[in-house]
Image (cartoon, rainbow, N blue to C red):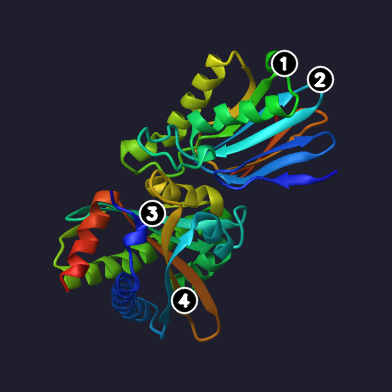
């Protein structure tokens, strides 16, 4: 049976490389959209315990934005992008460039949400393109779904997928750097168990 | 008074005036058992409905079937009387609606398995706040046997 213990340092390096390339694509897409430079850094790709992940996200009760995109094709599963609610709103503000200011609260919220979904499309799309071009896998993505809720509740989903076989999940942290401030996002690449094997087999072939 | 915090796939027992709490339940379920006479309570934070049949080295508290069964045993060891045991539960939400059915139903299946184990042990589920699409944090007071259920999206506090 597949075990997370089988994931070695070389696999993590490979995943980090995927992430770097994906993040690079995403950064240029975001920069051109915002017409000012946004750089993305990928400081971390690690296997961590579920409980530690909630600590990274400032505790299980911290309110986060969870953007979920399903993936299908040669590998199946999903990608979850998690950010502090405040950071997600700031990033959407950058994308909207102030055109949401002065609008009624409900309308403003709606604009921010669609900006965040668009951001998810760009970031996750770039990420998936990087995986595809490196591995040769055909991967399709679904329309993003966005929720705001407790970090623990949002991350439940990731824990559930591997829950039967492991207490570990794979976390990749991405830092979005604007001129003035740093905003943090966390990517969780969550292939289903079958696809993990496919992905690892492909890595070994490199 | 002390608040004992239970992490995912963990369980703890407390006595009045102490409280038991677990935070950020999504599809997971926080289940409480208590003996109102001696004011002792136990909480488990389960994640999946059923333990795999073939593995020996499992964490019982990760699964509803083995977790609730083990919590009953722990309560009896601590002096609770089985006929007096009462249960309350919260969680089992479906956080994202766009996922495939297997993961989608996990909250519901967690709840059904909890109910099944309680039924088999003739334990009444006296109150619950389950399902929906919101995360929950819960706090159980061993003195009053009230379970406080908090959500952030939308903001709400319930007492069951």
Label 3 and label 1: CA atoms lie apart by 44 Å
Residue B144 found in image quarter: top right
Label 1 and label 2: CA atoms lie apart by 8 Å
Q: Chain of mark 4?
A: A
Quarter the N terminus of chain B occupies: top right
Residue on which disc 3 sits: A68
Nearer to us of marks 3 and 1 is 1
Residue on which disc 1 sits: B84
Tell me which residue sits at (37%, 32%) in the image.
B53
Tell me which residue sits at (62%, 27%) in the image.
B73
Which of the marked residues, 1 or 2, is nearer the chain's N terminus? Answer: 2
Tell me which residue sits at (53%, 65%) in the image.
A89
**Crowd around label 4: few <14 · some 14–19 · many ≥20 (10 Å):** some
Q: Is residue A61 left or right of residue A141?
A: right
As rendered, which of A27 and B52 lies closer to the eye? Answer: B52
Nearer to us of marks 4 and 1 is 1
Q: Chain of mark 1?
A: B
The reply to the same-chain question for discs 3 and 2 is no
SS state under label 2: loop
The reply to the same-chain question for discs 2 and 4 is no
Q: Chain of mark 2?
A: B
Residue on which disc 2 sits: B37
Q: Is residue B54 left or right of residue B75?
A: left
Checking the image for residue A175, the label placed there is: 4
Residue A13 placed where, x, y %? 33, 76
Disc 1 and disc 2 in contact, CB within 8 angstroms: yes
Quarter the C terminus of chain B occupies: top right
The reply to the same-chain question for discs 1 and 2 is yes
Q: Is residue A33 above or below residue A194?
A: below
Disc 4 and disc 1 in contact, CB within 8 angstroms: no
């Amino acid at each position: 049976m597949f075990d997370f213990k089988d994931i070695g340092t070389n696999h993590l390096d490979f995943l980090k490389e995927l992430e770097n390339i994906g993040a690079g694509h995403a950064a240029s897409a975001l920069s051109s959209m915002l017409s000012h430079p946004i750089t993305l850094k990928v400081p971390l790709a690690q296997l961590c315990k579920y409980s530690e992940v909630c600590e990274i996200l400032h505790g299980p009760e911290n309110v986060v934005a969870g953007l979920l995109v399903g993936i299908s094709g040669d590998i199946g599963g999903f990608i979850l992008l998690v950010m502090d609610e405040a950071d997600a709103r700031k990033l959407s503000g950058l994308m909207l460039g102030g055109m949401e200011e002065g609008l009624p609260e409900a309308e403003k919220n709606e604009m921010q949400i669609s900006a965040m979904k668009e951001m998810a499309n760009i970031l996750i799309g770039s990420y998936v393109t990087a995986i595809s071009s490196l591995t040769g896998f055909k991967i399709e993505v679904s329309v993003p779904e966005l929720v705001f809720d407790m970090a623990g509740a949002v991350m439940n989903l990731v824990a559930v997928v591997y829950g039967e076989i492991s207490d570990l999940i794979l976390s990749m942290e991405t830092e979005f750097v604007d001129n003035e401030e740093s905003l943090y996002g966390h990517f969780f690449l969550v292939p289903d168990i079958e696809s993990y094997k496919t992905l690892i087999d492909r890595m070994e072939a490199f | 008074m002390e608040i004992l915090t239970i992490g995912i796939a963990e369980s703890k027992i407390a006595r009045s005036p102490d409280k038991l709490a677990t935070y950020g339940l999504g599809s997971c379920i926080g289940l409480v058992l208590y003996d109102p006479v001696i004011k002792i309570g136990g909480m488990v934070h389960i994640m999946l409905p059923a333990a795999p049949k073939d593995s020996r080295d499992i964490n019982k508290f990760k699964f509803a079937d083995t977790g609730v069964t083990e919590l009953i045993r722990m309560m009896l060891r601590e002096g609770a009387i089985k006929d007096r045991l009462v249960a309350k539960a919260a969680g089992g939400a479906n956080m994202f609606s766009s996922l495939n059915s297997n993961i989608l139903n996990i909250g519901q299946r967690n709840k059904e398995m909890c109910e099944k184990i309680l039924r088999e042990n003739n334990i009444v589920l006296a109150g619950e706040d389950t399902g929906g699409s919101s995360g929950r944090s819960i706090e159980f007071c061993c003195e009053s046997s009230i379970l406080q259920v908090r959500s952030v999206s939308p903001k709400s506090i319930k007492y069951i």
